């Protein structure tokens, strides 16, 4: 307990140092040539407009953006191993835990459009730092709280921080990718996958070594805050386009079309997370202890596909990348459903992860520069739609499986991904 408290205090000091550093860098940037365009109340800089940046500055922004995605993946993954401990401390049953976890999703969905509005008024950097601060403050509470109401409040705020971070880092990524004049979004999203694997593995390892949850959480906070302290001065501070528009708009036109494609992909991802092990155990006869290999393969090939995806997109183009990704993911799902062999079903999971890997990053790139809506509105809109897909996917699969069969539900996912492939020509 004492060790965890020390780490938590160190994390708070790191956040304070980071805020002081941001103030210094803001004053320094006004006197340097880091930002070529001037920032004033009458002519706000917009991340939707191009600017010429020195190569060293742009390279630092690229690394800092990657770290933002890494931090987001680590932060969300740290919570996952804490769930059984929180359930035991609060004395919750499965139903109570399910209701508690809704607080996380609710906080995230409500925060996403607010984060876009704040980025339009304050700039991405401040929103990113504020989001990480919320996460850093809530994680120790999630590792310690023993009452359901305290856990619910902490999860809501933690979810809000995670949702705001998700939205703001994608806004930042759109701007950095645009000024880099080459595809980078898949690589950014790949670092989120790496962060998830790193956070879950490290947290589980610390707990296995005998550290109490609060102490293990404190160690992970040092990583989160340390990455933020290095990266934050290089996060762009100019305001996103749309500062004088509404805080939230329903997606329309081409942005709505892109959002629906994101919804389909995230729905498949949510279904893979919660139902792949059930499918492999119940319908392909795999031992329950090994059934999790399906999602592990899905996650590994998705991370690999995203880390190598920028080169693929640059070679093929965005439309062909979406077409190929949808076809590969659809083929993988058909292999899972139609071939009654456990080994080939695992291969199908790998194909689904590889196919889905670069579709969503392409959608974020397209939405960030779509003429129908400014980035500060379009990015939160499709982020919210995507997150809704993750939440809806498992429940929808359950309803279809109850009404028909689990195989029919997975067949529906295959049809969705083939539909994404067919839609590529309209992007």
Image (tube, rainbow, N blue to C red):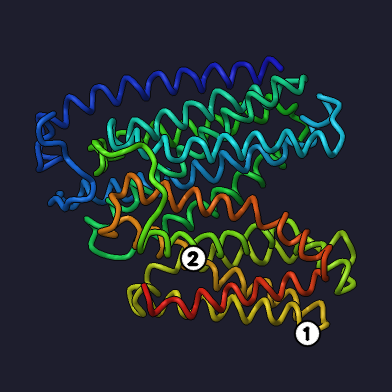
Between 298 and 370, the residue placed more toward the observer is 370
Q: Is residue 396 visible?
A: yes
Task: Characterize the local packing of mark 2: few (<14), some (14-19) or many (20 or more) Cα atoms within 10 angstroms.
Answer: many
Indicate the quadrant containing the N terminus: top left, top right, bottom left or bottom right: top right
Q: Which residue is mark 1?
A: 339
Whether residues under marks 2 and 1 lie with C-beta atoms below 8 angstroms apart, the answer is: no
Looking at the image, residue 4 lies above or below residue 421: above
Q: Residue 127's image quarter?
A: top left
Pinpoint residue 245: horizontal percent, then vertical percent: 27, 39
**Vertical arrangement, residue 200 with respect to residue 122, above or below:** below
Taking the image as drawn, is residue 184 in sight?
Answer: no
Q: Residue at x 88, y 61 (%)?
A: 288
Q: Earlier in the sequence, mark 2 or mark 1?
A: 2
Q: Position of residue 232 (x, y in %)?
A: 34, 34
Residue at mark 2 to residue at mark 1: CA–CA distance: 27 Å
Crowdedness near tag 1: few (<14), some (14–19) or many (≥20) residues, C-alpha within 10 Å: few
């Amino acid at each position: 307990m004492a060790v965890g408290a020390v780490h938590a205090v160190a994390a708070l000091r790191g956040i304070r140092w980071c805020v002081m550093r941001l103030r210094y860098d803001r004053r320094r940037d006004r006197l340097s040539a880091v930002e070529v365009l001037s920032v004033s109340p009458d002519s706000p800089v917009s991340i939707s407009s191009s600017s010429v940046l020195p190569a060293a500055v742009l390279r630092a922004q690229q690394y800092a953006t990657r770290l933002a995605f890494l931090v987001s993946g680590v932060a969300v993954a740290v919570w996952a191993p804490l769930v059984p401990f929180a359930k035991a401390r609060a004395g919750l049953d499965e139903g109570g835990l399910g209701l508690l976890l809704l607080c996380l999703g609710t906080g995230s969905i409500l925060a996403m459009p607010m984060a876009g509005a704040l980025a339009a008024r304050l700039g991405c950097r401040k929103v990113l730092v504020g989001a990480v601060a919320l996460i850093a403050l809530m994680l120790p509470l999630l590792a310690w709280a023993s009452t359901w109401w305290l856990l619910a409040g902490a999860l809501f705020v933690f979810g809000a921080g995670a949702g705001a971070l998700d939205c703001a880092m994608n806004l930042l990524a759109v701007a950095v990718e645009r000024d880099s004049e080459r595809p980078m979004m898949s690589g950014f999203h790949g670092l989120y996958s790496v962060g998830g694997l790193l956070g879950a593995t490290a947290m589980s390892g610390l707990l296995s070594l005998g550290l109490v949850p609060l102490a293990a959480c404190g160690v992970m906070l040092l990583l989160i805050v340390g990455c933020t302290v290095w990266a934050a001065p290089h996060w762009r501070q100019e305001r996103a386009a749309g500062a004088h528009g509404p805080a939230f708009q329903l997606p329309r036109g081409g942005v709505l079309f892109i959002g629906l494609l994101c919804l389909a992909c995230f729905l498949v991802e949510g279904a893979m997370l919660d139902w792949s092990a059930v499918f492999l155990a119940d319908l392909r006869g795999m031992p329950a202890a090994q059934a999790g290999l399906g999602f592990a393969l899905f996650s590994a090939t998705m991370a690999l596909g995203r880390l190598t995806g920028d080169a693929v997109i640059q070679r093929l183009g965005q439309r062909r990348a979406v077409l190929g990704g949808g076809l590969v993911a659809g083929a993988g799902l058909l292999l899972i459903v139609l071939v009654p062999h456990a080994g080939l079903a695992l291969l199908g999971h790998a194909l689904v992860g590889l196919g889905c890997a670069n579709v969503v990053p392409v959608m974020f790139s397209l939405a960030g520069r779509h003429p129908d809506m400014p980035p500060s509105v379009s990015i939160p809109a499709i982020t919210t739609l995507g997150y809704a897909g993750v939440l809806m996917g498992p429940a929808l699969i359950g309803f279809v499986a109850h009404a028909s069969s689990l195989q029919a539900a997975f067949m529906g996912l295959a049809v969705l991904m083939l539909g994404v492939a067919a839609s590529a020509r309209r992007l």
